[in-house]
Amino acid sequence: MPVYEYECNECRKVFEVQQRISDEPLTQCPECEGEVKKIISMTSFQLKGGGWYADGYASASAGKEKKAVAPAAAPAATPCSSGGSCAGCPASTS
């Protein structure tokens, strides 16, 4: 269940409440009964590393094969017929 943070407009107390997503937001401070507002805080959920697939859910060989990514090329001097740049298009090398 998600944890939401609220701040009281009267006493300035910041508190956390565990609520369902479908629950209505709180409107009153539990201490002074003043009006509260929901605040946005840093989540504890973070995506780090090579990704969930490469870190543990792939087959043993899939995580070891990493392809080098070429740096982005400068845009081509003349755009292709579609109106975009053909710099990275495989058809532009023919």
Image (tube, grey):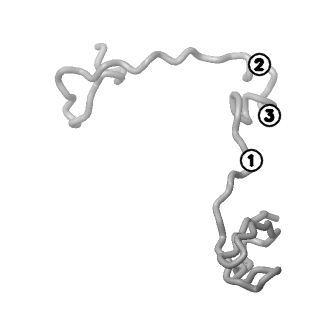
Residue 30 versus residue 24: which sits nearer the camera? 30
Measured Cα–Cα span from mark 2 to mark 3:
11 Å
Quick one: SS at disc 3? Answer: helix
- For badge 1, the amino acid type reads Phe
Residue 16: x and y in percent read 79, 66
Screen quadrant of the C terminus: top left
Mark sitting earlier along the chain (3/1): 1
Residue 40: x and y in percent read 64, 61
From the viewer's perspective, is the residue at label 3 or at label 1 nearer? Answer: 1
- For badge 3, the amino acid type reads Tyr
Vertical position of residue 49 compared to residue 74: above or below? below
Numbered marks: total: 3
- Where, by quadrant of the figure, is residue 46 drawn? top right
Label 1 Cα neighbours within 10 Å, binned few <14 / some 14-19 / many ≥20: few
From the viewer's perspective, is the residue at label 1 or at label 2 nearer? Answer: 1
Vertical position of residue 67 compared to residue 44: above or below? above
Quick one: SS at disc 2? Answer: loop
Residue marked by disc 3: 57
Farthest-out residue, front: 11
Measured Cα–Cα span from mark 1 to mark 2:
28 Å
Residue marked by disc 2: 61
- For badge 2, the amino acid type reads Ser
Mark sitting earlier along the chain (1/2): 1
Quick one: SS at disc 1? Answer: loop
Residue marked by disc 1: 45
Screen quadrant of the N terminus: bottom right
Q: Residue at x 71, y 29 (%)?
A: 49
Residue 14 versus residue 18: which sits nearer the camera? 14
Measured Cα–Cα span from mark 3 to mark 1:
19 Å
Residue 50: x and y in percent read 69, 28
